[in-house]
Image: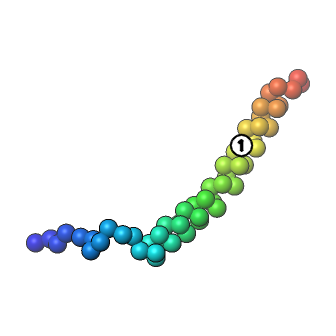
Amino acid sequence: MLKKFVWKNDVLTLVEILTVVVILGILAAIAVPSVLGHIKKQKMRFVMLILPS
């Protein structure tokens, strides 16, 4: 018979919260420069499109 995982209480521990915050921080540190780079490229493409050749 399989035992079900049951929380003893419904409160997250400090370690769990800190783990989530650290993981989100790492993901943000990776994603933000990439997104900013794409925004910069799109702005440059827009400017090149607007300026007469």
Residue 35, horizontal then vertical, whole percent:
66, 49
Q: Look at 82% across and 25% down and name the residue there.
A: 50
Q: Look at 62% across and 55% down and name the residue there.
A: 31
Callout 1 secondary element: helix
32 relative to 2, above or below: above
Name which quarter of the figure residue 48 lies in.
top right
The quadrant of the rendering that contains the N terminus is bottom left
The residue tagged 1 is 39
Going by the picture, which residue comes out furthest to the bottom?
15
Q: How is the image coloured?
A: rainbow
Number of numbered tags placed on the structure image: 1
Q: Residues within 10 Å of mark 1 (few under 14, many from 20)?
A: few
**What amino acid does circle 1 point to?**
Ile
Q: Look at 72% across and 49% down and name the residue there.
A: 37
Going by the picture, which residue comes out furthest to the left?
1
Q: Is residue 18 left or right of residue 38?
A: left
Residue 13, horizontal then vertical, whole percent:
41, 74
Residue 21, horizontal then vertical, whole percent:
53, 66
Name which quarter of the figure residue 52 lies in.
top right
Q: Is residue 49 left or right of residue 23?
A: right
The quadrant of the rendering that contains the C terminus is top right
Q: Is residue 37 left or right of residue 52?
A: left
